[in-house]
Image (cartoon, rainbow, N blue to C red):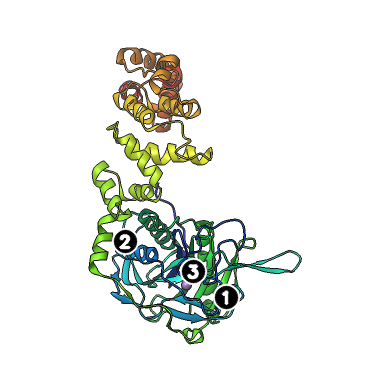
Amino acid sequence: MAEETKSILDLYPDYRVDIGIEVHVQLDTKSKIFCASSNDQTETTNDHICEVCLGYPGTLPVVNKKVIEFAIKAALGTQSKITPRCTFARKHYFYPDLPKNYQTTQDNNPICTEGKVVITKADGTEKTIRLIRIHMEEDAGKNIHSQSGESFVDFNRAGTPLLEVVSYPDIESTEEVRAYLKKLRALVQYLGISTGNMEEGSFRADTNISVRKKNDPNLGTRCELKNINSFKFISDAVEYEIERQIQLLESGQKVIQQTRLWDTKNKETRPMRSKEEAADYRYFQDPDLPIIEISQAWIDQIQQSLPELPDQKLKRLQDQYGIKSYEADILIEDRELAHYFESTAAHTQNAQLINWVLRDVMGYLKEHKQSIAEFKITPEKLAQLMNLLAKGTINNRAAQEIFELVAQDGSEPAEIVKAKGLEQIEDPAALEKIIKEIIDANPDNVAAYKSGKDKLFGFFVGQAMQKTKGKGNPQVINDLLKKYLG
Ligand code: MN
């Protein structure tokens, strides 16, 4: 099941890559961060706006307590230090979708520092990605450019609360980029603070990439890949950018620090702008907002309300069901699938269940574009199928056939077994008779097998399966064949 990951780095063994990621997580609050306007992301433009989020002179912001609570949840979920007295700052820049001409964000005293996210790699090993900080800020509006050359601005998103999660450059491959983003996304979803939907822009990653020779102690010059909204594109873009930078260095050129965009059509990164320095933003503490004081009592209260988080679930699934870490890792990414697995496991002891869920259930849902809710094989029915297999009533081939039928019409596995006569033939005497017939009918192949053509064993198994209409017990058939051919 482990994903095969071939990296461009395999071609350049002298190089290593250092990646730091900034993720903007859109918080799922009812109202915006500094006013009472709705935080619903609607289709109609400019219907969730007020004087405050439009930046009218003389208006004053009021902090939404829910945003602080969500930030504390993120802190607890990432084992971050919580700043007891944190402040908001103004970050100045001029752009039509930013009505105040500054973004209210956090600078020197972010709410969280020094957290961590533990990722599971494809080979099952764990790695800790350290977080520099998590800070709260408001989103800007959205510029819309029409075909006819007109430009509009929609302020519905202006003032939407965000958490910006900033990692250290601890990430060293495209595989780790994906694992990090998936883990962080699962975390905000479990915490109930964001939908984590990438395509809708609720979870946006900016990826800072630099490469260097392995023996170089200093980080290379980095480029930032902005706002890529799918896992597929991120993997492609990161791979492309690593290769671009290595080839620049290999040909004696320099990497220029800049922000780049991923062109999904031409599958390449393109320069967007050279990066501003922090000084260009002229940060200063926002005089309109108070210092936010966070008491230990409040933190404790939030801690007690936390649900089971991905890391805890990862360990519990392994302990409780004896599954491997990469299997548990796939389940924690998809809470519905994990719930399905656990509901099924409540009715069967068959240890093969995890394989059926990750291979057959996931495969079927993907192929037929179904959700778990639409899936006709309920946990009870899958458990029934697993129990028929475990008892030896049916063999694996029959189980596959029954799986497809139940998935189509939701019928009972046990009834399909009866109606179609799929019971496994296990009786050694009955199977022995069939094996003897096959051996008598194929003297040439028997001689060839005995003279060393081991591959012919498959031919005999195939014959036996054909004669039993696929219902013979494979283990008994194998044993009998070995006895008569050996
Ligand atoms: Mn930001």
Determine crowd level at label 1: few under 14, some 14-19, many 20+ residues with C-alpha closer than 10 A: some
Percent position of residue 87, x then y: 37, 78
Between residues 361 and 150, which one lies in front from this camera angle? Answer: 150
Q: Nearer the viewer, mark 1 or mark 3?
A: 1
Above or below 219: residue 445: above
Q: Nearer the viewer, mark 2 or mark 1?
A: 1
Percent position of residue 126, x then y: 31, 59
Label 2 – label 1 distance at C-alpha: 33 Å
Above or below 67: residue 305: above
Mark 3 highlights which residue? 206
Amino acid type at circle 1 is Pro
Name the mark on residue 344: none
Amino acid type at circle 3 is Asp
Label 1 – label 3 distance at C-alpha: 23 Å
Residue at 24 percent of width and 43 percent of height: 320
Q: Nearer the viewer, mark 2 or mark 3?
A: 2
Mark 1 highlights which residue? 99
